[in-house]
Amino acid sequence: MDASLCDTVAGWLAEALETGNPLAPLPAAAMPPSLRDGQRIAAQVLEALGLVPCGFRLTPGPAGAMVPGPVLEGRLLPDGASIALAALRHPAVAPAVLGVLAKDLAPEEEAPPVFASLHPALDIAAWRLRDQPLSAPLAAADLGGHGLLVAGRGKRLEPVPLRVGFGPATLRRRGVETDIPAALGKAAEVAREAGGLPSGAVLVAVLAPALTPEAGLEISASFGALGRVRARFA
């Protein structure tokens, strides 16, 4: 993708992020053709606004693709947070695991990531685009749909398969056995391809399924030995 066109699209997205006004559909010529182009645009958006990411997030995206994106410290919320839906565009909530890195995630390494702590989390996707993106590269350009992250209490726990239960807090449900090491390992692999992460940064693996929140609904996710996390929507 031409560098000047990347600059233009990044400028449009930066303005949308700063003002809160939605970005109209891009002309066909301005659509990023690859995930790498989308990531490049997202990085330029953050640079234009002087925002420094505190981590990396990998989430299921359009057409079954996995979409990378940054994590912004100002969008991390504590367990039990109350969230105004009016501030979010096309919101979707999914369970997630957030790990705080105990050592650098170096691009040249292949070893599993080492974590100082793991946290149960709820990932709340949202978009700067007026219409929800239908391609993974466009989703990556719009910060991977990064909206908010609600994180629960951390534990010094090695990644292990966990039974994950997710949905409205008022409903009893059986958890689904989930390969947490594989999810975090894939997030680490993509983060390394993007340049790696320093010790202390966060690595987020967003899991399926996602649901659309409604006003007055409390949503929770339970992760067995890792604990649980909740958020209320208004």
Image (tube, rainbow, N blue to C red):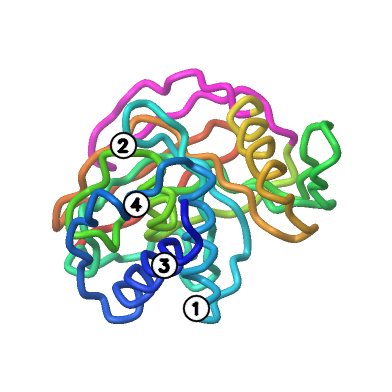
Q: Residues within 10 Å of mark 2 (few under 14, many from 20)?
A: some
Numbered circle sitting on residue 10: 3
Q: Amino acid at mark 4?
A: Ala
Percent x, y of residue 225 = 60, 33
Pointer 4 with pointer 1, Cβ within 8 A: no
Q: Secondary structure at mark 3?
A: helix
Residue beneath disc 4 = 125
Vertical side of 35 occupied by 8: above or below? below
Pointer 4 with pointer 3, Cβ within 8 A: no
Pointer 1 with pointer 3, Cβ within 8 A: yes
Q: Measure the alpha-carbon separation of dots 4 and 3.
A: 19 Å
Q: Measure the alpha-carbon separation of dots 4 and 2.
A: 9 Å
Circle nearer the N terminus (3, 2): 3
Residue beneath disc 1 = 48
Circle nearer the N terminus (1, 2): 1
Comparing 167 with 107, the one in front is: 107
Percent x, y of residue 89 = 21, 59
Q: Measure the alpha-carbon separation of dots 3 and 2.
A: 27 Å
Residue beneath disc 2 = 210
Q: Amino acid at mark 3?
A: Ala
Q: Secondary structure at mark 4?
A: strand
